Image (spheres, rainbow, N blue to C red):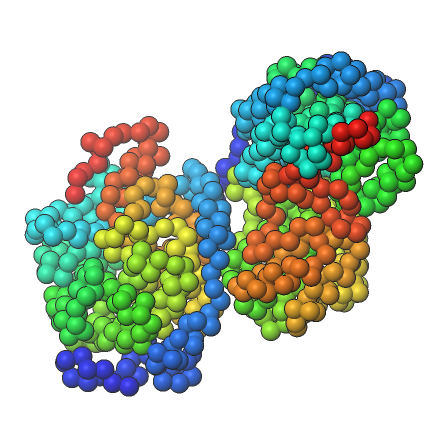
Amino acid sequence: MSFLDYAPAPESRAIVRLRPSYGLFLDGEFVDGHGTPFPTISPATEEHLAEVATADEHDVDLAVAAARRAYDEVWSKLSGSDRGKYLFRIARLVQERARELAVAESLNNGKPIKESRDLDIPLVAAWFFYYAGWADKLDYAGLGANPKALGVAGQIIPWNFPLLMLAWKIAPALAAGNTVVLKPAETTPLTALLFAEILQQADLPPGVVNIVTGAGATGQALVRHPGVDKIAFTGSTAVGREIARATAGTGKKLTLELGGKAANIVFDDAPIDQAIEGVVNGIFFNQGHVCCAGSRLLVQENVHDDVVERLKHRLSTLRLGDPLDKNTDIGAINSQEQLDRIRELTAAGEQEGATPWSPPCELPANGFWYAPTIFTGVQASSRIAREEIFGPVLSILTFRTPQEAIAKANNTPYGLSAGIWSDKGSRILAVADGLKAGVVWSNTFNRFDPASPFGGYKESGYGREGGKQGLSAYLAPSGGAQ
Amino acid sequence: MTIDTGAGPRSAATTRGAARALDLLDGPVTDTTLRRYLEGIPGVDAVGLDQRAAGLGTRSIKTTSKAMALDRIIELIDLTTLEGADTPGKVRSLVAKGITPDPSDPTCPRVAAVCVYGDLVPVAIDALGALHAPRSREAGTGPGISVAAVATAFPSGRASLRVKLADVEDAVAGGADEIDMVIDRGAFLAGRYSQVFEEIVAVKEACRRPDGEDAHLKVILEVGELVTYDNVRRASWLAVLAGADFIKTSTGKVTSNATLPVTLLMLEVVRDWHRLTGEKVGVKPAGGIRTSKDAIKYLVTVAETAGEDWLQPHLFRFGASSLLNDVLLQRQKTKSGHYSGADYVTID
């Protein structure tokens, strides 16, 4: 027996008690939706987890009306410090129920429990704690004295970090004094619904947060609803474009956090072992379902072979399998649809002459799985170097000079994030200066903090989330827009 | 290049270690060539290294894997006593503990070695009797237990080379199978890399026994005095280039000893050395590893960095004393299902 065949160490599912079916969370209560309910599954096994309601236009109307009422009658009249108290309470409840939320997140999303446990859920709590502190300090948000809330915010979030994206949206909105109608992603509604229970536990006034589940049509109804003052969306660039069109001229405020094709730039003087870790973390974290994933590795030509060899060695130690096993590094792809997309793009990569490599790894028979893959010999013109794959697939390109690295890194319609690996501080600063990306990490990757703004250039969207900038996205200057 | 060891000039180039270095440095071993080589090795990002070690520390080793790990830890222990107050009686007690760690369980494996000061080597060998590694190997009765001696003016290393070599020769003549030497941290920090290099080469020579066998050489870097990870990486390379069979973190005599990140860093060096030359060099974290839980994190780090091949006594050791009893308690727990207490393991 090999020591490296670690015995199974599954996190217990007993802590999560899912109901057989979930309604919509409207005005503080779970109610039935008027659309056809849909099943939600575990992508790792395709096991049926629960039935979830679909909100149709009428339900969205009710949700917006509830949010408006809560805004007019309760939330806008509360002092900032009282709003802060609710947010602190929510943050503490998230911490108390952290393990339950982590297990539910891994079940419904397919991500490894070590990530939901050590990253997603702690960051969710951190986000609420951070914005709880802002609630009574809005005068310092950068908009002058007495900034005003916008009103009702419609928020649409993706399936890659279901609860974390919810926190990114809800925490600043509530701190700034808005009320919310939130639509979770179709494939990952469960933690949002558990979060609704937390809101009941926290005694949040009814209607301040409403959660409407459903597919694209539900989101569309929310975007087009005239009673919504602000739309915040995280997801694909294609849908983001549609939303921009739909809201144009309506007076709705809009922030979009869209796709990315980030360059992770490794110079020849990089701290090599840490750079390898950063590259692995950059693209294989959360199965590559990360909008800011470092999906293009730009490596200086003179160290290309060494980096690729080290990368292969490191990839062969990754463990793919049961998301609830505490030793799993790579979980399941979130849906069949996403798996098909990954397969299509990697097939195109091969056709275009790039060479794929994956470590030997056994894929489970059920569920949606894709082995971690690196492509060498990728040309800048290849589809896998241009399009967002949103999966555990890394495209490796080379460069010769810092100027070339910057030019190649920027040569994309996206501009969400980038990474620089070098031991030379002056070079890091100079290269970072030239990169057109919202976030530039140096000698690290995929680090998030509620105090740090996050957002993109170009087709990666506009507006910022996190920090004071994320707060002001939910505020208007005094005397400005209602 | 010759070194005056006080015992007549020796040629560094004739030893295995120096030959390694001459190949890589492509020139004579001088401060300049060593500096060029060591400072050309990529740096270490401390935040990233700590993060990686913390990540490895989250592996969850349960049930059969845990049972396997606990036995393996015992087999990798250098059971150590390095006190001014050590007596022959204390050493005999330590040896008995190494042979029979858990008197209530005959399936409990033996430790890899006992580690003592040089003057107590004959006492340890005598106490081991037929279980002393060379005799045991000859008799075909299993691996036996080795005797390791610290030498070279341990722990400070502040003595002339002549005194250090005399210390080593004494221990080797006494029958030590392994020598744990300290590097001259002062010379290293002052940039006199060739001095450190030549001392290691000379000690390696002094490890030769008349029968032609070598006492295995463990080179202690004393990471707590090198302070930065960059220094640890360079010192590791330097020791490996000079012919170390093992690189060891610390003496256990300063405030900062073995840590998981520093051990990970040293494992990366021996992994890279293996990639480069096909040779396998061992790693020994020492000092401060007291619990099974911590020790298991080290096993994980070894297996996932250098490879599972390294989890053998000739390539990985724990320098520890109190660790053994914690492992025994955990071992009893995995067998019986309940925790016993400190009175159910022996004081050594």
* Residue A425 location, quadrant: bottom right
Q: Residue at x 38, y 77 (%)?
A: B34
Front-lying residue, A152 or B46: A152
Relative image position of residue B24 (x, y in whole percent): 42, 79
- The quadrant of the picture occupied by the C terminus of chain B is top left
Q: Residue at x 70, y 50 (%)?
A: A438
Relative image position of residue B340 (x, y in whole percent): 27, 29
* Residue A314 location, quadrant: bottom right
Q: Residue at x 42, y 37 (%)?
A: B63
From this view, report whether residue B225 is shown above or below residue A447: below
Relative image position of residue B57 (x, y in whole percent): 44, 45
From this view, report whether residue A193 is shown above or below residue A378: above
Q: Is residue A216 visible?
A: yes
- The quadrant of the picture occupied by the N terminus of chain B is bottom left
- Left or right side of B162 for A360: right
Relative image position of residue B269 (x, y in whole percent): 42, 64
- Left or right side of B17 for A294: right
